[in-house]
Amino acid sequence: MSCRPVRLTLHSRVPSLAPQFTLYYREDCHLCETMLQALRGLQSRLVFELSLVDIDRDPDLQRRYDEWVPVLVEGEDEICHYHLDEEHFVGRLEKAKGDGGSIF
């Protein structure tokens, strides 16, 4: 029997076409907390949607990301793991802006 992952979505000035990212994390993970705090800080000035998924609630996700958390993804594309690569992340937001969205 497989448990469904818990998905929490954090919004900040999010229009319907805002880029959507997922942060795979686990409870009591210092690196996970650090990356989440950095992303929340960016949400105060950039537009994006962030879903949080606890990998320990889904055996498949636990096997996939166990030693890699935190992992930030957009769709199926991994943006970074362990530490936020802010330059790469903002670059993805800039690309979304170029596709008709706005990051501000």
Image (cartoon, rainbow, N blue to C red):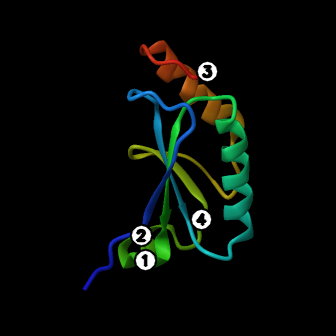
Q: Contact, CB < 8 Å: mark 4 with mark 2? A: no
34 shown above or below 30: above
Instruction: Name the image quarter holding the C terminus.
Output: top right
Q: Secondary structure at mark 1?
A: helix
Q: Is residue 17 left or right of residue 24?
A: left
Q: Alpha-carbon neighbours of circle 4 within 10 Å: few (<14), some, or many (≥20)?
A: many
Q: Residue at x 73, y 47 (%)?
A: 38
| Most foreground residue, 102 or 23 | 102
Q: Contact, CB < 8 Å: mark 2 with mark 1? A: yes
Instruction: State the residue position of label 2.
Output: 61
Q: Which mark is residue 69?
A: 4
Instruction: State the residue position of label 3.
Output: 104
Instruction: Give amino acid for label 2.
Output: Leu
Q: Residue at x 72, y 52 (%)?
A: 37
Picture coordinates of residue 2 (x, y %)?
28, 80
Q: Secondary structure at mark 3?
A: loop
| Most foreground residue, 19 or 44 | 44
In this rendering, the label closer to the viewer, 1 or 4: 1
Q: Residue at x 67, y 58 (%)?
A: 82
Marks 3/1: CA distance? 34 Å
Instruction: State the residue position of label 1.
Output: 57
